[in-house]
Amino acid sequence: MRNTLRIHCLLLLLLAAVVAQQTHIKLEQGDLIGLKVFPDGTRSAVYAFLGIPYAQPPVADLRFAPAKPSLNWNRTLQAMAMRPICPQLSNTIYDEGSDGGVAGGGGIPRAAQTDEDCLYLNIWTPETGLRYGKLPIAVIITGEEFAYDWPRNRINGLDLAAEGIVVISVQYRNNIYGWLGLGEGHRQLPGNYGLTDVRLAIRWIQRNADAFGGNPDQITLLGHGSGGAALVLASALEESNLVKQLVLMSPGPVLRSLGSGHDQRIMETGRVLIQKLGCQFEEAQRRQLLGCLQRTSQEDLLRAYESVYNHGNGSYQLGVVLWRGLEERLHNQTLPPVLLGITSNEGAFLQDYWLDVAREGQLALQEYINHTVMPNVLRSLEAGSDENGSQMAAIKWRYFNGVPERGGSVVHLLNGMQRLLSESLYELPFFRLLDMLNGSTSYAYVFDQSHAMDMRGRKNLFAGASHSSDLPLLLGPSLFQQIARRRFTGEEEQLCRKLRGAFANFVKSGNPTPGRIYDAWLPYNRQNPFIYSLGEQQAKPIQSGGLDEAEIDKLLRGDTAAGIDRSLSRTNRHDTYRAGLSNSYTSSNQQDSGFSGHLQRVYGFWQVLLPLEKDNEFRGGALGQRVRLLEAHADAARYRQGFYAMLGLWFRWTTIFGGGKDGQATSGIASVESWRKGGRAAKRERGEGEAERERREQPLNQRARRPRQLQPYDFKATPAAGGAGAGAGSGTVEELLDPVPSKFEPNLAVKNWQYQLTCDKF
């Protein structure tokens, strides 16, 4: 009897301990019970409320309809588990792997759960928030290409909330479910359903912020990825009175996806999808259209969407329709303070489909680059079709050094392709967006970490940090351990603290480095294009952050082994702007990455050189003649190197197989060496004319300088009159095409530009 009583007492104590790890709050819709959790390495508790409905399930009559507020629940809601995300395609680039090599996980694959009943919030709030209230709120919205969200490695705000912030993640409709529409004037199918989800979630958060210990007047929207960042921008423009600050991480091509002409592409895609689904009706039967779509199965909807998406290579697109376009809206409306940045090598986020093509061999990858990748890039930049034209030739020369025409290793082709996508689809739009935000307070950054792990758990085998590699470090060990199945290294822990501290400061105060002077994070503007370096700070050797050819070879080795040409290894372009502690970009601040100079060169190539090349204005001008001269010098250097290499091989052959005596062979080589020295001396003597002798007779301080030796080139468009980034590189050739503009305007006409031809090694 006594033992039974002891057991009952122990059970009661255990039950009390379990209850103590839960918390109970009241909302407008009803009561909630959440979990009390202690983040790794902290003593302060964080309360998690997961799977809270903010809208009615978008099913049946609410499919393809604007979101409607959630109804009250008549019971206590157990908010202890996340709900499934909205339906999306599977087996895509954004599916998280679990193989032990590249993915780095080595764990059991986790099932990706999806459901049309998916409009839910997940909230993490510090214990101090529930006690004292009025904490700043960070609303996280992720998504890629208006098509996907991370299906397995879900956003976890536990560690970020430990910084004294209420963290909320929002689930919303994507792809065909969120963006199928025929325009605002179409009453049955207007589109923008995903945007109505996010706007309704923001209003729900503002109404219920006090219950979670948050401040409804201090809401920061954080968008990650091309879809998440675009949604944050669109929501801020529509709900400007509800948002205090914005964070845009890896925004990608938001200018195109929110541009004034994008609505026509979305409506055209909608018409194609409706036709594929068999729901096309005459004008008098428009009411039947919505009913047909609502009766269509989930499998048929996703199959139709997949047919137009085509691994991201399709010409049809869906997304947000922002009336009057982003550029016009930003011209007439000032955004709240913005923190925005990208990783140092966004394009290294490789698709499995690319690797499958690469495993077929060099020719297959070469054809894919020539006929799929480069035309899609030109189309995305609205540069038109230029197959086999001068623009294609310029792109091949810059990113592949002509390899798609002359041949090269598979690794070299992959390296050039990821660099092409990184600069054209991320870095160029990022630079243009920074300029458009010149009227707002904006803080820019670049995140750099060699061989970083992305949200899929995959290690980057190319230079720099790939797309999404900053998110696991920002959100801390809870998410990182879920992805990598291991703990932080010492360096990763330092990077995590640096990112988390800067972002938390911005959410709290609107300044990522408040109170600092020496290493202050300065706002970005045209006069001072300051881009903060988040990531590795130590100075590194040139090749230290380069591509890992051996690991790439292992990755590609399947049916066909990838050939690796070691002679094609290039210097790491990211080391040109990586800041070192002893070599700061500016004398006043050691944290400026100097990345703006690289962005200006990228802009110069895509927005200055290529349009001139397309219009045939470049070839006949003085700048074009100078470029051809540089190309001739580069070709001559390669020919000389090849000649001397062949000459050395010939003498080695004659030494071994010539049949003569060793002394004869040695004397022959010596005579050739003396001939080479004599030839150089004779050449110097012939080239030294009267002008050269007069120059030598002058004092040293009055002599004219000899011209520098020419090197392979790259373009750099810079602000006139010594704007930021001017003078970078190893020597410039300036061509003034018109009077110098008074300020830096990237979208001015070409004639208002000052050109600089910067000699940069690729």
Image: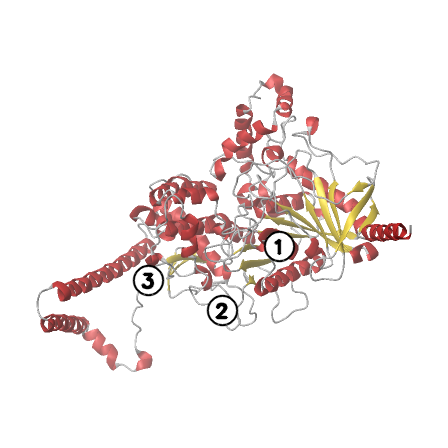
Nearest the eye: 184 or 640: 640
Q: Secondary structure at mark 1?
A: helix
**Closer to the N terminus: mark 1 or mark 2?**
1
The amino acid type of the residue labelled 2 equals Ala
- Give the distance between the C-alpha atoms of the residues marked 1 and 3, in whole angstroms: 47 Å
- Give the distance between the C-alpha atoms of the residues marked 3 and 2, in whole angstroms: 25 Å
Q: Please give the residue where the numbered disc 2 appears in the rendered image.
A: 539
Look at the image and tell me whether residue 328 can be seen: no
Question: What residue is rendered at 29% in x and 56% in y?
Answer: 631
Q: Please give the residue where the numbered disc 3 appears in the rendered image.
A: 711
Question: Which part of the image, by quadrant, shows the C terminus?
Answer: bottom left
Q: Tell me where residue 651 sits by quadrant.
A: bottom left
**Closer to the N terminus: mark 3 or mark 2?**
2
Q: Secondary structure at mark 2?
A: loop
The amino acid type of the residue labelled 1 equals Gln
The answer to the question of whether label 1 and label 3 lie on touching residues, with beta carbons closer than 8 A, is no
Q: Please give the residue where the numbered disc 1 appears in the rendered image.
A: 481
Q: Secondary structure at mark 3?
A: loop
From the top left corner, tell me how far across and down residue 464 is, in percent: 49, 58
**Closer to the N terminus: mark 1 or mark 3?**
1
Residue 68 vertical position relative to residue 555 in the rendered view, above or below:
above
Q: Residues within 10 Å of mark 1 (few under 14, many from 20)?
A: some
